Amino acid sequence: MITLESDTLIVGFDEANGSLVSLYSKTAQWAPLDRPHLGLSWRFLLPLEGKRNNNAWGHLQERPECVKTSGGVSFMWNKITSEFGGTHNITVTARCEIKNGQAVFSMNIVNNDTVYVENVYYPYLGDLRRPSGCEKFTLQHGGYCQMSETSLYPSFPNTRGYFGDDYPMVMPSWAASTAPMYPFALVSDEKGNGLYLGITERRIEATTWMAELHPGYGESMGDRVPDMDALDGKEVFTRFGPVHFPYVAPGASFELLPFGMEAYKGDWNTGASCYTKLSRAWNKDPAMPSWAKDPHAWLQIHINSPEDELRIKYRDLPKVGEDCVKHGVRAIQLVGWNNGGQDRGNPYHDTDPRLGTFEELKEAIAKIHAMGVKVVLFSKFVWADRSLENFEKDFLPLAIKDPYGDYYAYSGYQYQTATQWMDINTRRLIPMCFMSKEYFELCRGEFKKLVDLGAAGMLYDECLHHSPTLCCFDTSHGHRYGAPSYSADESLINAFTEILAGREFMIAGEAIYDFQHDYYHLSYTRTASRLHKPVSRFLRPRGAMMTAVIGFNDRNMINQCLQNRYIISYEPYNFKGIPSDFPKTTAYGAKMDALRTELREYFWDGEFRDKLGGAVTTADGKGYTDYSVFTGTNGKTGMVICNYDDTPVRVKPSFENGSPSRFRLVDEASLRDIEAGSLTIPGKSAAALI
């Protein structure tokens, strides 16, 4: 065995076949991999004519050339053998190096064969063991600005359906949940014993997560994992790792996206810190438009849908602006202003003659801006509406294609009528290829229409994904076969920025993934759950993020906004109303924004740390989880504690570097002292502590 050691892990490899055969967490005294005979190195899919499911397994190859250094090891195979294809002229170099406290796995592939290297499983854990005595073992990864969690024990859901695999399998079902959109995954137990796996380079490649339970369920009712190491003479184990989709063509070489592995002890935010310690070196924050730098709130309002509501004429929009002024709302996200309404006519961004003229909308925007309220126009560039008369002629050639040459289709959205709700006349959305120069230039022209209307910005809906696609196979677009669908996301926004020529303009998007924060000013999302884990906020502690507030006395959502430094997006009647429609909500929201304006050095300008740096217990000493910690620009610590229940709760807060001395409820106008180290928070209230 060849052993490498990081700050948190001891990693062992079999010199004879390059397999990862041992893992030990020094942090948790836990061996995630301790049965060497189950170790694996890598797995390739090398499709053959008439035998697509043809795999090559690293541990079954001839002995590789092994090179050991003080900080790493590499294994090289000059040729590899697959199950059904014989010997392939493919050179594989697999490396593991200790960098930045992590065991970093990288691989180079040189394909001089006639087959494609379609999938690569690497690094590949052949036996992911849960900590001894644990009651719950889970896989967590990001998705739509929050951590999603899937059980690996005691239950193991088959997320892909038993008909399509040999063993129960967990794999993200939504393209936007894959790495590097959300660039790390955590496996951990209920005591916080965790193993982190995440990317170590800022690079877009098609990659996902996969866990696989062998030999299968002990009991299928409840998806139960067998509690023993063997069942009916068959060993029980879980394979786990990232799966890459590089489509390395014959004659090409490829460097896989590298992944770092690290052990940790703590909550998900401790695990996420394994990523942020690297990502802060490549992250950058764009300069925020001046009007959005202070605490403020938005209104989202929808004025038309594909079913033709035609709710508000352009010339009447200033009345909405007047209501926003009345309630202190700083910006309006205007939805459905385009011809045909929301989610119809994409990617065109023309005005709708039934609502008025281009000049009438431009004039209305100017009038609202004169009131001190900004108008941000809802936009969409990912899709083409398949119901467009010119879809087949103008858009089908530019759509993302599958390996059979067909375009992918996204299901679309249903609006307002039972016919749509039953998905009878839904307008399907076809993901388009930004790597196509022709489509790229079309999007530039459509963006310019927003600028010419005099808008203060755009909110680019669904910019976070190209579902259901990960890759495009139409090489007539000017890219390689199987190029990642997300490859040109950054280039498109940079091209939009060139059109602005220095003009102040808000670039906002829906639930933007981590890399997009480098060139988007704001991320809009929906977070209405007590179980919300704000992973995007943790990765980007000072980024502008906004969430929907829909209820007519929505105190808890406003408290969550304070807890997670989210901007309020007021959306009465499911974003069909105006602020005056729910006065209780807007009044409480104004109080919350007043609080974080007064204490902005902590709760607006400070650094969000989630649970790191502080703790909260109840009066009887039990842990309390509805809080977050902030490091103020003054170097001091702040905390927000929320009570999402109806009844009061008494809590005792503490900081790593001392104790809070004063607090203020959202409903109160001033700070008061914390007496005897604890305080009572009324139902559906929040306290800010400093």
Image: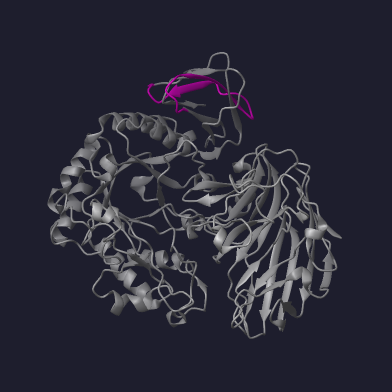
Q: Position of residue 31 (x, y in %)?
A: 78, 48
Q: Residue furthest top?
A: 676
Q: Which is more toward the observer, 338 or 613?
A: 338
> In which quarter of the view is residue 282 placed?
bottom right
Q: Is residue 648 magenta?
A: yes
- Rendered view: 275 above or below 611: below
- Rendered view: 390 above or below 231: below
Q: Which is more toward the observer, 189 or 508?
A: 189
Q: Residue furthest front?
A: 232
Decide if residue 31 is on the left or right side of residue 201: right
Q: Quadrant of the N terminus?
A: bottom right
Decide if residue 541 is on the left or right side of residue 670: right
Q: Position of residue 541 (x, y in %)?
A: 51, 44
Q: Residue at x 29, y 28 (%)?
A: 584
Decide if residue 123 is on the left or right side of residue 179: right
> In which quarter of the view is residue 15 placed?
bottom right
Query: Magenta stretch?
Result: 643-669
Question: What is the image's colouring?
Answer: one colour
Q: Position of residue 12 (x, y in %)?
A: 81, 57
Q: Residue at x 62, y 73 (%)?
A: 53
Residue 448 in view, yes or no: yes
Residue 203 in view, yes or no: no
Q: Position of residue 179 (x, y in %)?
A: 56, 59
- Rendered view: 361 above or below 247: above
Q: Which is more toward the observer, 417 or 370?
A: 417
Counting the numbered discs, the total is 0
Q: Residue at x 53, y 47 (%)?
A: 148
Q: Residue at x 61, y 62 (%)?
A: 201
Q: Is residue 33 magenta?
A: no
- Rendered view: 545 above or below 500: above
